[in-house]
Image: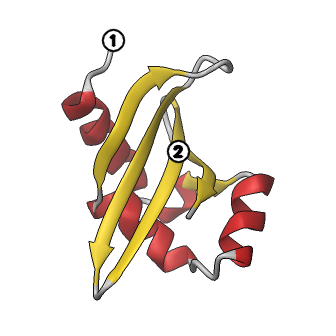
Amino acid sequence: MFNAVTILREIRRIAEDSSNIVLVSHGRKRSKQRRISRPQIECCIRKGHIEEGPFLNMHGNWQVAMCRRAAGEEIHCVIAVDLPSRVLVITTY
């Protein structure tokens, strides 16, 4: 069972290697549509804070909504943690 502190620690551990951050098709589509770059997404996941969650989604993964404010921009990512080694980006806004 995870809480916000423990899941954030796990997310940051996994996200140290950018190849562990995977954008699912919906996430790719929305990030392109909203002009959110891969580096912005990675920064949100690595340095952002949890706004909502964690909770178990219907696929059995822990899911959170994260936010990062930097350089006058606010980036939001909804991610699922596919333990032990991937962070799945579901959508961005």
Badge 2 marks a residue whose secondary structure is strand
Query: Seen from this angle, which residue lies furthest bottom?
Result: 71
The amino acid pointed to by label 2 is Ile
Badge 1 marks a residue whose secondary structure is loop
Q: Cα distance, mark 1 to mark 2?
A: 17 Å
Residue at position x 23%, y 29% in the image: 6
* Mark carried by residue 87: none
Which quadrant of the view contains residue 44?
A: bottom left
**Mark 2 burial class by Cα count in 10 Å: few <14, some 14-19, many 20+:** many
The amino acid pointed to by label 1 is Met
Residue at position x 36%, y 58% in the image: 67
Residue assigned mark 1: 1
Q: Is 65 placed above or below 43 here?
A: above
Closer to the camera in the image, 14 or 52:
52
**Mark 1 burial class by Cα count in 10 Å: few <14, some 14-19, many 20+:** few
Q: Position of residue 71 (x, y in %)?
A: 28, 88
Residue assigned mark 2: 79
Q: Is 8 placed above or below 2 here?
A: below
Q: Is residue 16 visible?
A: no
